[in-house]
Amino acid sequence: MSDSAPATTSTPVSTRVAGFVKQPLIVALILIAALLLLGEALSPGFASGQQIMRLLIVAALLGIVAAGQNLVILGGREGIDLSVGGVVSLSAIIAGNLMAGENSGIPLAILGCIATGALFGLFNGIGVTLLRIPPLVMTLGMLGVLQGLLVVIRQGIPSGRASPGLANFVSQPFLFGIPGILWLWIAIGLVMAFLLGRTVFGHRIYAIGSNEQAAFMAGVPVKAVRIALFVLSGIFAAIAGICLLGYSGSSFANVGEQYMLPSIIAVVFGGTPLSGGKGGYTGTMAGALLLVILQSILVTINIDESGRQMVFGITLLVLMLFYGRGRSMRA
């Protein structure tokens, strides 16, 4: 008989830490709680119910934009939609002018904005798939077109007015004391979960994001799916533009630019690598809220806009180390 005891194995601390970091939703929720505590310490009342509700409204605006960004990134081929800020701005201006402060103009404004967002998304999708222009180049070029169009239309002057109904929907209690925009965001979250997890279209998104060539050989209409992703991105950006008009009351030509980089960061923080094929929208929702809280803290400590953009840029680079390397992190 041998007197030696059976060898015991223990999981290295580094392995446990790496496993924890690979759970972006949990990390995001912990950081959200930590940032709320930090904000409360810096400015008493930061974590009050009223302030949290305001932060949720702002996060919903970002989260709606990030929904479309999430779909494009999931589709792989380093897909990123840099034109979302321009679509948000243009949609806010279109909605404001079609409403002109009247509730009767809401249906036409919604239809007009969604059609506009879908049209520019279609242009992006055609450029990426049929003309084979890299998504980064195509959407950056489209952003330039949109910015030029906005300057020609309004030259930076506020344009249009939100209707009282839209303003109340975004900012005032709608059901169970919760503003309508939060119910809209919840509905989008449920639709995204169903779309990605329960539909053939969702499975095709993951397939082309994981291996486009294999998906094509399996009969997946890769080009049609990719075009649809850019169209949906444009539609979500347009919806965010309408809601942003309701939040601010009027719109400026560059009002949507603030959502371009944060929408990408929210997606990456949510666990979707820029290589695509893995991830979901639940984590993106948490990422959007986290970024809004972080931005609010930066404002509280008097960091100007340029400083906040630097922080967001550094945040994206750090997140890329953990979540953005794609295939190397896939189990």
Image: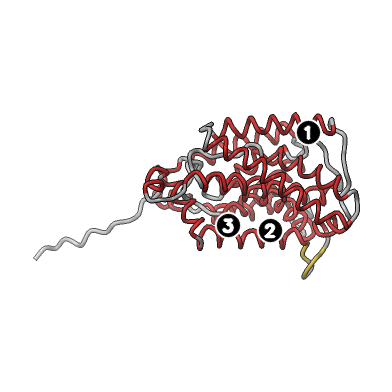
Which of the two residues, 309 or 210, is positioned nearer the viewer here? 210
Q: Which residue sits furthest left?
A: 1
**In the structure shown, which secondary structural element does the residue marked by tag 2 occupy?**
helix
Residue that appears at 80% across and 65% down: 174
Q: Where is residue 286 in the image (x, y as percent from the top left)?
A: 61, 54
Q: How crowded is mark 1: few (under 14 residues within 10 Å), some or many (20 or more)?
A: many
Q: Name the residue under label 1.
A: 150
Camera-nearest label, 3 or 1? 1
Residue that appears at 62% across and 59% down: 189
Which comes sooner in the sequence, label 2 or label 3?
2
Residue that appears at 83% across and 42% down: 251
Which of the two residues, 243 or 34, is positioned nearer the viewer here? 243
Which comes sooner in the sequence, label 3 or label 1?
1
Which of the two residues, 290 or 177, is positioned nearer the viewer here? 177
Camera-nearest label, 2 or 1? 1
Is residue 323 in view?
A: no
Question: In this figure, what is the number of numbered marks?
Answer: 3
Q: What residue type is labelled 2?
A: Trp
Q: Name the residue under label 2.
A: 185
Q: Which amino acid does label 1 sit on?
A: Leu
Q: Distance between the residues labelled 2 and 3?
A: 11 Å
**In the structure shown, which secondary structural element does the residue marked by tag 3 occupy?**
helix
Q: How far apart are marks 3 and 1 (CA)?
A: 33 Å
Which of the two residues, 63 or 117, is positioned nearer the viewer here? 117
Q: Where is residue 259 in the image (x, y as percent from the top left)?
A: 69, 41
| 74 to 254, vertically: above or below | below
Q: Where is residue 277 in the image (x, y as percent from the top left)?
A: 46, 48
**In the structure shown, which secondary structural element does the residue marked by tag 1 occupy?**
helix
Q: Are marks 3 and 1 in contact (CB under 8 Å)?
A: no
Occupied quadrant, residue 298: top right
Q: Which colour scheme is used?
A: secondary structure
